[in-house]
Amino acid sequence: MDSSTTEQLGKEVKEALERGDTAGAFEKVKKCLSDVENTPLNVAITGESGSGKSTFINALRGLGDEDEESAKTNVVETTMKPTPYPHPKNKSVTYWDLPGIGTPNFKANAYLDKVQFQRYDFFIIIASERFKENHILLAEEIQKMKKKFYFVRSKIDQDLQNSQTRRAKTFNEKKILDTIRQDCFNSLKCYFKYITGDSVFLVSSFQPEKFDFSRLLKTFEEELQGHKRYVYLRALPNISSQAIQMKKQALESTVALVALQASAVSIVPGLSDVNEILSLSYHIKGYVESFGLDEKSLSNLAERSGRSNLKHLMKSPFVIKEITYNLVSRELEKRNGAAYMIAKRFFSWFPLLSAVVSGPMSATACSDLLYSALNEIADDAKVALEAAFGCSE
Ligand SMILES: Nc1nc2c(ncn2[C@@H]2O[C@H](COP(=O)(O)OP(=O)(O)OP(=O)(O)O)[C@@H](O)[C@H]2O)c(=O)[nH]1
Ligand SMILES: [Mg+2]
């Protein structure tokens, strides 16, 4: 969540409090959180048939080919209709699998009309070999529509493997990657003035923790603004410690609001039957899932990386144990301290509002718990990643 949103919210909350309208102030906090969390982000993935679009979408969604909700791979798509794939945990983020662009009479503007180009925040153009005329025509048309696009060169693991098989003695990974990058750059540079070698991202959707996948995710983050940036970060796949860190920071930016919302149930009329502890449990569960540490995701990760078990390396009680009412109440009692200072620094109006909460626990205690839970869950996510792939950077 960005500082202008917080500033605006702070102003409105203060005004409501000055009028003595505490319930109204909390309503504003609640609405702000809901607006931030439900901002839609739509990303279009396009390229020739078989270039790896669906597999790439699964990697972005943190899913393997065999997961229930994954996009079907290796099936020839004949439909002209874009297929939406919502992020499994963050439904406001949708990746769209667009129809292939390989037909001989390809008309970029008609294609973009058909797929309703206005719907997308940005486009990813994938090629598993060279970028060809159709990719360039499409990118030029996207540019005319004032939308952003990114060039992704897929199946890099396959290139490396082929080369290793054919030229085992002289195999040099860096040299091959440089050659592919230069080759992509050469085919694009005369059409796009500002393009550099770094504008092409070399990825393997089978090994997203390697090559340029992480740099690609960071680039999206740098170019997105406001709420869209927040929902994007929340939906990041946990493929590097950098991605985990970015996600943690995004989630931290809403801790104070989540804490206020949880504790406000004791003063807002009509909400009295909603339990604060349940609200906290719900959010902490969300953190565990978001970092891929729930039972299912963790065992998928162990399987993918050939480890028998990763759970024994985890330290946070919220990862080790089931998140129950009792666990959250116990942890709430145990923790307090420095985290409150963070909320205070970022949200000058936070203490003012939390002071009026007279429930069984304060907003401050809630935010302490959420901050520390988030930190230790993110730490566990880094440990799991390091143990799984040994390359967390
Ligand atoms: N080695 C390797 N194979 C990949 C990668 N990405 C995709 N593939 C394989 O390439 C084939 C096609 O992948 P899909 O993801 O189905 O390609 P697509 O672009 O969605 O294809 P259509 O839906 O037919 O347009 C499948 O056999 C994938 O397993 C990758 O990063 N590395
Ligand atoms: Mg497909």
Image: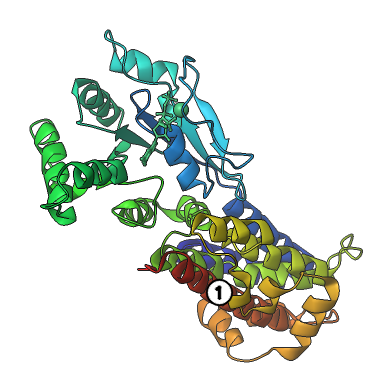
Q: Tell me if residue 107 comes above or below residue 298 in the rendering.
A: above
Q: Amino acid at mark 1?
A: Asp
Q: Is mark 1 within 8 Å of ligand 1?
A: no
Residue at image location 12% in from the left, 30% down from the top: 191
* Horizontal side of residue 212 vs 390, given as left or right: left
**Snapshot quadrant of residue 167:** top left
* Horizontal side of residue 326 vs 160, given as left or right: right
Residue 271, x across and y down, in percent: 87, 62
Residue 221, x across and y down, in percent: 38, 55
Quadrant location of ligand 1?
Answer: top left
Residue at image location 45% in from the left, 20% down from the top: 76
Q: Tell me if residue 349 comes above or below residue 388 in the rendering.
A: below
- Whether residue 84 can be seen here: yes
Residue 249, x across and y down, in percent: 48, 69
Residue sitting at the far top: 105
Residue at image location 65% in from the left, 54% down from the top: 34
- Whether residue 147 can be seen here: no
* Horizontal side of residue 318 vs 102, given as left or right: right
Q: Secondary structure at mark 1?
A: helix
* Residue identified by numbered label 1: 380
